[in-house]
Image (tube, helix red, strand yellow):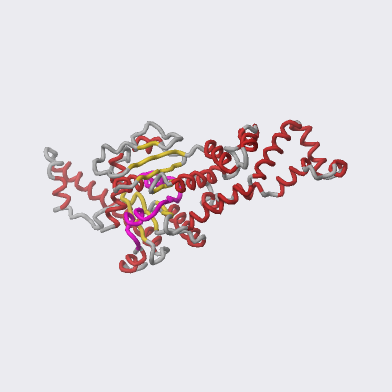
Amino acid sequence: MSTSSEQKHRSAGPPLGTLIGDRKLVVCVGSGGVGKTTTAAAIGLQAAIRGRKVLVLTIDPARRLANSLGLSRFGNDETQIDLSALPEAKGELWAMMLDQQKTFDDLIERIAPDDERRDAILNNRVYRATADNISGSQDYMATEKLYDVVESGRYELVVLDTPPVKNALDFLDAPGRLARFLDKRVMKWFLSPYDKDRVFGRLLTSTSAVVFRLLSHVFGREFLDDLAEYFQHFRDLYDGFRERQEAVVEMFHDRKRTSFLIVCAPNGPSSEVARFFLDELRQRRMPNPGVIVNQRHLTLGRKLNARTELGETLTGLADGLPPAAASSLAARLGAAHRRMLGLSKAEGTIVDSLLQALQPEQKSWQVPRLDDEVNDLAGLARVGACLFDASET
């Protein structure tokens, strides 16, 4: 166990407010169920309060978060959030949910070499049926939309709530996955029967031709023609996908404009995921200023004196109660506090261990478990204040 001074050194780094003020992109990563989406929205709101024009881009958000932002639901378009309830807000807050199909369509329109090939892909029935189901396409589309809005210059800051992923590396590996898919040998093999340079007689004796005739019998030649056209046009777009991939990777590594923030809860499984992300981001040389520990149980850090502090708490609460009932209430309050103290101590042990994995320049921010649900802008502002204000003291 490190000393308190060592822990302070390990968590040293730029205040979160200063960090947000200097960056164009903040990406929140971590395991599910730790308040990652709420944290992303709270960061965006605090940046807007401080005068920036901010977009929070989220994937599959909870309905509760939409309500917190004053929306009946998240839409597929960039929607401005009404901040009139927060007179201190000096900037603008916008939000949107990723529309995977629309993002894919927009990408095709941007990188298609001409209108004919663009329309051929967009109207291809295989494309329409599979665009949402290509392996890893949700993660790829998240990075694509991210690159688009950051490069557009419409916002001073973009905050991304990363998509729910089974494999924690899916999002980080997303740039280039589609390009690698388009370059696979299976695609080249499938397209070989359509290669105009091949001699037909030679083709008929090839293994691919035998399998191709079998597939034609099972699925029908028309379907295979559509599939081959789909693959052929996507192969023609390979250079465009590769260029976009390289641009996204460069953006992810740009320390002057990008920061990855790891969000976790103070429990064993979540802290292990946080450690995993710390290692992966470090190995990939992606800028990571530190970890946000969400939903901490904070207490006085000591036992309560039953005769003084508990007595003061009970004053008024126990008025009118028989002495025995008042004594029982005091005992139960004391027991509840001891249980909370034990929980807080256990969480502290987990957090202290996590802090030891930080580099000297990295920092940790802690958000206490709030008494009330975060269901409005005021709640988001409270979460954001815990991150911005407490880290700057």
Q: Residue at x 43, y 38 (%)?
A: 96
- State the image quarter where residue 258 is shown: bottom left
Location of the N terminus by quadrant is: bottom left
Q: Is residue 25 left or right of residue 110?
A: left
Q: How many marks?
A: 0
Residue 260 location (% of width, % of height)? 43, 54
Q: Is residue 349 above or below residue 197?
A: below
Q: Which residues are magenta?
A: 13-41
Q: Is residue 178 left or right of residue 157?
A: right
Q: Nearer the viewer, residue 301 or 55?
A: 55
Q: Nearer the viewer, residue 172 or 346?
A: 172
Can the viewer see residue 346? no
Can the viewer see residue 90? yes
- State the image quarter where residue 323 is shown: top left
Q: Is residue 357 left or right of residue 197?
A: left
Q: Residue at x 59, y 38 (%)?
A: 131
Q: Residue at x 20, y 54 (%)?
A: 304
Q: Is residue 64 above or below residue 176?
A: above
Q: Is residue 27 magenta?
A: yes
Residue 223 location (% of width, % of height)? 71, 32
Q: Residue at x 36, y 60 (%)?
A: 363
Q: Is residue 125 left or right of residue 159?
A: right
Residue 305 location (% of width, % of height)? 18, 55
Location of the C terminus by quadrant is: bottom left
Q: Is residue 83 magenta?
A: no
Residue 254 location (% of width, % of height)? 46, 58
